[in-house]
Amino acid sequence: MVNRQSHLIVKARDGAATGQLTCGNLTMPCALGPAGLTDTKTEGDGKTPTGALRLVRLYYRADRLSPPQTGLPSFAISESDGWCDAPLDAAYNSAVTLPYAASHEKLWRDDHAYDLCIVLDYNLDPASPHKGSAIFFHLAKSDQEGLQPTEGCIAISQENMRQVLALVDQHSVLIVQRA
């Protein structure tokens, strides 16, 4: 039987675009928004929101990866999957089917960031306009200097994500706080 983790903790210093994520006995580096953490997220501010964020569901690229071991509800994404980021649209901060007229993110990406992508319960139901959208826990991009900042999400390596996924379920909460 898997020992599911009810809490994951992200800690970062003010203004830092990286932090540390702890899940059970695992500790790993994570990427954050380039402007660090915020208690008052707004759309496009480049900041990662603080607080307790429930892990809602996992999206994965079935053409690139086999379904991961996890207690989260899991869905294979397709080329028609998107996420609305238009603050005044009725579908703001929710999944949409592409093509979609309002501003949106494509979940089916050329890079590997959303090959494993967990939707976090941030500003979801109901979504408040301009309070931030598409706050995900996904795969990090890296270069010679380390993990690259996200747009406001939390990101870790694929190896670390697979370890975390095996320990979480729909009751798990990601707590984002200042170090």
Image (tube, rainbow, N blue to C red):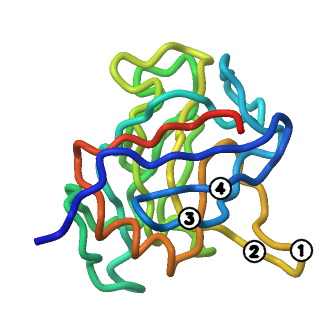
Question: Mark 4 is on which residue type?
Answer: Gln
First in sequence, mark 3 or 4: give its number. Answer: 4
First in sequence, mark 3 or 2: give its number. Answer: 3
In the picture, the quarter occupied by the N terminus is bottom left
* Residue, disc 3: 27
Q: What percent of the width, then of the height, locates residue 150?
A: 71, 53
Nearest-to-viewer mark from 1 and 3: 3
Question: Mark 3 is on which residue type?
Answer: Thr
Q: How many discs appear?
A: 4
* Residue, disc 1: 145
Question: Mark 1 is on which residue type?
Answer: Glu
Instruction: Pick the residue in front: 136 or 100.
Output: 136
Left or right relative to 137: residue 76: left
Label 4, label 2: how far apart the Cα atoms are: 15 Å
First in sequence, mark 1 or 3: give its number. Answer: 3
Q: Name the quadrant containing residue 18.
A: bottom right
Q: Which residue is at 30% across, 43% downward?
A: 56
Q: Tag 1, which secondary structure?
A: loop
